[in-house]
Amino acid sequence: MSINPLEYQPGGDKKNSEFFDEYRMKIYERRQSSGVDDLLKTMRGIVVQVEHGDALPYLHELYLMGPYRYTASFWNTTHKVYVLTSEPEFPRLFVLEPLEKDYEDEITMYNRLYPLSSQKPNARYIGEIFSTKDVAETQKTLESHNIRFNYHHETKNPFFTESHFAFTFPSDFTCNRVGYTQVEIDDFNALQLGTPFELDASVVDSLNQVVEFAEAEKLNSLVLGVDHLATRILAGEREDAILEFLTMSNHYFWGAYNISAMNSSTNVTRNGYVDDDKKSPAKVFTANNTPSFVNSFDNLPMPTEDFVRNYGRRLHHVAYEVVDGNHRAGEKNVDYVVNTLKDKGIPFLAHVVGECLDEPNLKQIFSKHSDYSILITEYVERCHGYEGFFTKSNVAALTEAAGKDERYEHGHVFD
């Protein structure tokens, strides 16, 4: 499958500005003329950082809730780096853990600006890593497009500057980075991630116990790869954030949809060169329709804007696709997965939303925020070949449930 972004007509009912439509096309044209589209391939890595001491419990959580399994681990001068793999063609997961409890860098400073992220000042979704034919040429070209890259004097963690990745500076709109590499993602010697080390036998044994449980309960065969990655941003920065990501990637703008009940919109970009989004997950951007200071006149719901004010601009959730089908009579696979995880103590924000009867549709649910990554896990089952990432009623229900869990009490104001 290959989508020509210059010919594709985005879907949805969210009205975009003339500025957005003009520069969206200019960005596509420049990507082609400058060679960016020819250089970039699929998303090969996803990077998450946790607090010192949280990596191993986070690995256990990942084992239970999704398909990722430990592959290798490394030390550098500031961090441990854990590499996890699911299917070979799906992105790897890199988990970063500071070596010291009092470690501080730019991520720490970002998180301490906001009341609910300051509780875990080093825990943050970092960004994605794309494969490229030539990393130096990619960096040179994107820098000519005013994309800033990280250099040694700008960050402490050598993962961003001394490995064979080239990472952009954190975005002003999303605080996420984008990385690029021409090295095969499983060639750890070439990637130069640091000094290898082995997990303790007791840790390996406890992880294997989770694998045995997942296999016995059929979770391994039901929960597939990452379907999409959803970032929450401020109302006035929606179009800029999308255009910036289109500049830095080979994604196209799939569409934007108003979620009127929650005073927000959901905006989706996809990689048009894959036949399965799990090979290069979609990036979703969610924003309020009105900023908080204007909304004070109308008092509409605004859980998306409240999330940004409480946690900062950042990734909100990682969605896994669940195999479509019935586990038992009258029970869809996603219901079975969620009920099984609930029995193991995984908390969820609400019930599964959506119906899968005789027509294409989808069922979805949000977990509560991880104690380690601050990320929500979503499970989505597309029924009868449903095409798309959401229904408006589903998104409204999920957004409302998340908003109730992401409130911050201060003075007489409750966000």
Image (spheres, rainbow, N blue to C red):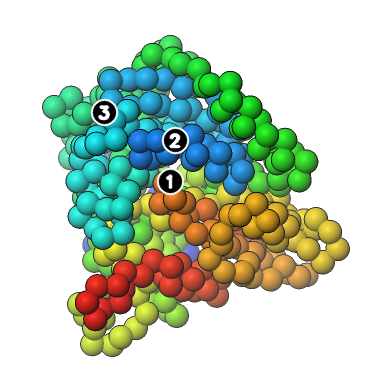
Numbered mark located on residue 55 in the image: 2
Q: Residues within 10 Å of mark 3 (few under 14, many from 20)?
A: some
Q: Of 316 and 240, which appears nearest the observer?
A: 316
Q: Residue at x 65, y 52 (%)?
A: 344
Residue at the extreme front: 202
As drawn, 364 above or below 341 = below
From the viewer's perspective, tell me whether residue 152 is left or right of residue 257.
left
Residue at the extreme bottom: 298
Q: Quadrant of residue 378?
A: bottom right
Q: Residue at x 30, y 77 (%)?
A: 414
Numbered mark located on residue 354 in the image: none
Q: How many marks?
A: 3
**Among numbered discs 1 and 3, the one appearing first in the sequence:** 3
**x%, y% of residue 22?**
27, 58
Local SS, label 3? loop
Q: CA distance from mark 1 to mark 2?
A: 8 Å
Disc 2 marks a residue whose amino acid type is Ala
Q: Residues within 10 Å of mark 2 (few under 14, many from 20)?
A: many
Indicate the quadrant containing the N terminus: top left, top right, bottom left or bottom right. Answer: top right
Q: CA distance from mark 1 to mark 3?
A: 19 Å
Residue where numbered disc 3 is placed = 157
Residue where numbered disc 1 is placed = 372
